[in-house]
Amino acid sequence: MSRKPKALVLDSWAVLAYLEDESSGQKVADMIGDAHEHGIPLLMSVVNAGEVWYILAREVSETEADKAVDGLRLLGIEFVDADWQLARVAGTFKANNRMSFADCFAAALAKEHKADLVTGDKEFKQIENAVKISWV
């Protein structure tokens, strides 16, 4: 990381790439390692964690989904609850862009924390002017 972000927000796309050992998953792993090395907080909205959980539960099993989410916590990823302030910012992204509501929560969390959003989801291209994206 040449420029140190205040925090990294992981969206479900990045986390699934990491968990499923996709090619971009190694970039996510490297970013997590760099964040630990430099004391940079790792954040994820509970909405996005829920999205990861339901995708894994559907594709593998609920037990494996539970293990994966527990593993994210062990990696030092802090799950941030969705309060009204975060939901309001997410709602603004949704009202003004063609994005999934879960993705809007990742964007809102990054905006609220002045953090870099880690993703490979092209849906986020439309908000690059509002949130710093770290593409993987």
Image: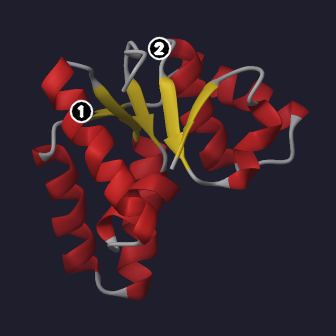
- Packing grade of label 1 (10 A; few <14, some 14-19, many >=20) is some
Left or right, residue 8 beside residue 91:
left
Q: Which mark is residue 8?
A: none
Residue occupying image coordinates x 41% and y 16%: 5
For label 2, the residue is 113
Q: Position of residue 35 (x, y in %)?
A: 25, 29
* Residue bearing mark 1: 34
User: Which secondary structure lies at badge 1?
Assistant: helix
Q: Residue at x 37, y 75 (%)?
A: 56
Locate the N terminus by quadrant: top left
Tell me which corner region of the image, top left, top right, bottom left or bottom right, holds residue 25. bottom left
- What amino acid is at disc 1? Asp
Compare residues 112 and 86 and report the one nearer the observer: 112
Residue 64 pos. (x, y %): 21, 77
Report the front residue among 120 and 92. Answer: 120
Task: Say which residue appears at 33% left-offset and 87% top-offset.
Answer: 60
What is the total number of numbered labels drawn onto the structure image? Answer: 2
Sequence-wise first label, 1 or 2: 1
Q: Nearer the viewer, residue 32 or 48?
A: 32
